[in-house]
Amino acid sequence: MLTGWSRSTIGDKLADVFDPPDALPFAVLYLHALDERTPVADPIFTEALRKHRLRCVAPHGKQCWWSDRICSEFDEKISAEGYLLDVVIPSMQSAWQLGERAVALVGAEMGGQGAIRLAFKHPECFPMAASISGAFDSQDWYGRGTPLDEMYASREHARQDTAILHIDAHQWPSHLWFACSPDDAECYRGNDRLHEKLAALGVPHTCDLDTRAKAGTRYADQMTPAMLAFVATALERESKRLV
């Protein structure tokens, strides 16, 4: 665990929390990937948080896909989405006296699609969302032995709950950012499809679907500084808009 991080319990579940002493009145809610790794040991993510003076909460969600369906390995009674909305967000707001629209959703792969989908569903609560290598075609993971197999009756049922099908043509998050390498055979098609859908509807967004990982560099490490810079700017703009 890197300096600045601590492990806490929110509700009855573990979460990693970054709370720098000079933090601005904003926060990032990080949704992890299928590998269940939070940024607690990620020096690049941590340094970017520190640079932009951002707090961060990274709940431990198992392989819940951050959806509004019950995932038994996460919880038998509350969905991951319900936990985020009803437990985590109120906890963050209370602990840090956060104003409205002061939390940005970010994530990678499973968490990336979760962040964007949640923002599409609740843009009034989450006006900022960002994703690296988001698994937007999450139905493609159906039948691979992840909890999706118990959460949805079929691949088609899973597809009907994907982020792209939660886009509202009349209301959307004010600040959207996502990136995926063209070399990512699992996730690129879903990111490209999302970009095309948003462009067709006239929904403003920023995406990078051209950059490839440099030799010897993890793609997520390469893109994290740009993602958190975007988030920091978006949070500041929202705060001024509410004044």
Image (spheres, rainbow, N blue to C red):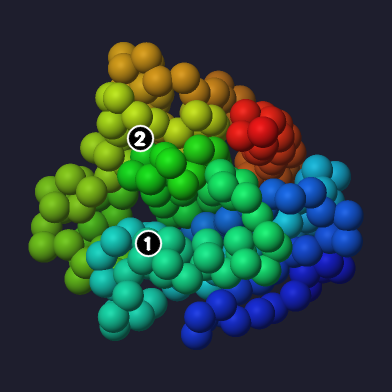
Q: Are dots 1 and 2 in contact, CB under 8 Å?
A: no
What x and y, as percent, mark residue 73?
A: 35, 80
x 50%, y 85%: residue: 12
Instruction: Name the residue furthest front.
Output: 243
Which label belongs to residue 190?
2
x 61%, y 34%: residue: 242
Question: Is there any visible trace of residue 126 in the rendered image?
Answer: yes
**Quadrant assignment for the N terminus:** bottom right
Q: Nearer the viewer, residue 163 or 26?
A: 26
Q: Which quarter of the figure has residue 163? A: top left
What x and y, as percent, mark residue 138?
A: 31, 49
**27 to the left or right of 140:** right
**96 to the left or right of 133:** right
Question: Is there any visible trace of residue 187 in the rendered image?
Answer: no
Badge 2 marks a residue whose secondary structure is helix
Q: Amino acid at mark 1?
A: Glu
Badge 1 marks a residue whose secondary structure is helix
Q: Nearer the viewer, residue 32 or 230?
A: 230
- Gap in Å between the C-alphas at discs 1 and 2? 21 Å
x 23%, y 48%: residue: 161
Q: Which residue carries the number 1 mark?
A: 81
**Quadrant assignment for the C terminus:** top right
What x and y, as percent, mark residue 49?
A: 77, 50
- Badge 1 crowding class, 10 Å Cα cut-off, few under 14, some 14 to 19, many 20 or more, is some
Residue 38 vs 62, above or below: the answer is above
What x and y, as percent, mark residue 216?
A: 73, 42
